[in-house]
Image (spheres, grey):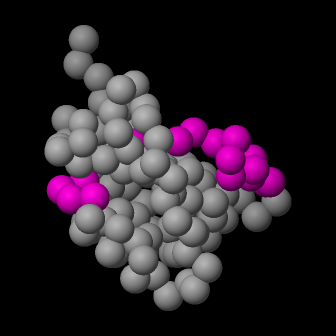
Amino acid sequence: MKARINLVLQVADIAAERTFYRDIVGLGEPVMNSNVWVEFKLDGGTSFCLEQAAPNKPLLPPHSRTEFLFFVDSLEEFEKRYRSQKNADVPEGVPCGQMGIHAVQYPDPEGNLFRVTDNQHS
């Protein structure tokens, strides 16, 4: 069976989240880009999607949502981009392991947790 996987994250501020995942995480330009749906193509036919939550629909607390693991070209370069955010309260990454992979965990602008690693640490 050939499957296509879309990972969908509901967000309160799709514009801020689009900018973060495009520029800081480095997912590049989205292939679908609107004020309610943003889709980034990833390797292997997978997509990472942001969906604007309905105004009257409460979101789950950030730390109870799914966490994502992104493979980046360089953890060091990612850390520089992450630190370059205009928000002065950018938290430190937390080293962690996931299925035997060394990774660092960060929150996105809404507090959704994600992890990054590179090929040197996988």
Relative horizontal placement of residue 23, taking residue 44 as reference (left or right): right
Q: In the displayed structure, would residue 109 be above or below residue 114?
A: below
Which residue sits furthest top?
Answer: 1
**Residue 13 x/y as whole percent:** 61, 70
Q: Residue 74 lies in what quarter of the image?
A: bottom left
Does residue 70 appear in the picture of this structure?
no
| Residue that appears at 61% across and 79% down | 89
**Residue 53 x/y as whole percent:** 66, 57
Quadrant location of the C terminus in the rendered image: top left
Identify the magenta region: 57-75
**Residue 11 x/y as whole percent:** 61, 59
Residue 45 drawn in magenta: no
Q: Residue 107 lies in what quarter of the image?
A: bottom right
Relative horizontal placement of residue 57, taking residue 36 as reference (left or right): right
Quadrant location of the N terminus in the rendered image: top left
**Residue 113 x/y as whole percent:** 56, 51
Residue 58 drawn in magenta: yes
| Residue that appears at 32% across and 75% down | 80
Q: Nearer the viewer, residue 34 or 15?
A: 15
Does residue 4 appear in the picture of this structure?
yes
Which residue sits furthest front?
Answer: 95
Q: Nearer the viewer, residue 101 or 38?
A: 101
